[in-house]
Structures are given as structure tokens and as C-alpha cells.
Image (cartoon, rainbow, N blue to C red):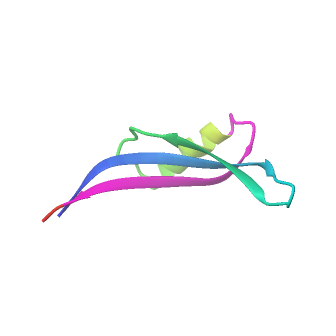
Amino acid sequence: MNHLTQTRLILTFNAGYDEDGNILFQTRNFRNVKSQSEDAALYQAGMAIASLQQHLVYSVERNNVYELSE
């Protein structure tokens, strides 16, 4: 059995490039997201938040944490 304990929305942004041309990433984590939220709704929320940011969005991720037990 497992029990969902936490859901997070993680936004990763392209914050520029280093001197070697590699992408510099910056992340924003949003905790206390409703675990019942549909993936599409979280994506839309992530894109809405991203539109308010200075940097371009690189990815929108959902992170679910489960407690595992027998």
C-alpha cells in the first residue's frame, strides 16, 4: 500500500547561458498543491505563473511523494 503525502508543482526556467554555452537553470517549487488536481490543470497553472516570470519556461513538472507501507 502507498499513501500520497505531498504534491508539488516545479517550474524550471532557462536563466541564460554560461561561458561554455550551457543552459543555466533556475527552479521554482510550489508546495501544498491539491493532490486531486488534474495534470492539465497543473500545466495551465504552471504556464500562467511562467508568463509572469522574467525567464523563459523550460519545463513544468508534477512531483508526487508517497509513503510506502505494507
Residue 4 higher or lower than 32, as above or below: below
Picture coordinates of residue 23, whole percent (x, y):
76, 57
- Magenta-colored span: 51-68
Q: Can I make out residue 34 in this image?
A: yes
Q: Can I make out residue 36 in this image?
A: no
- Picture residue at 74% right of the left edge, 52% below the top: 24
- Picture residue at 65% right of the left edge, 41% below the top: 50
User: Most extreme residue toward the top, as rendered?
Assistant: 52
Picture coordinates of residue 18, whole percent (x, y):
82, 53
- Quadrant location of the N terminus in the rendered image: bottom left
- Quadrant location of the C terminus in the rendered image: bottom left
Magenta stretch: residue 54 in it? yes
**Direction from residue 3 to residue 15 in the image, left or right:** right
- Picture residue at 61% right of the left edge, 37% below the top: 49
Q: Nearer the viewer, residue 67 or 46?
A: 67
Q: Main secondary structure of the magenta part?
A: strand
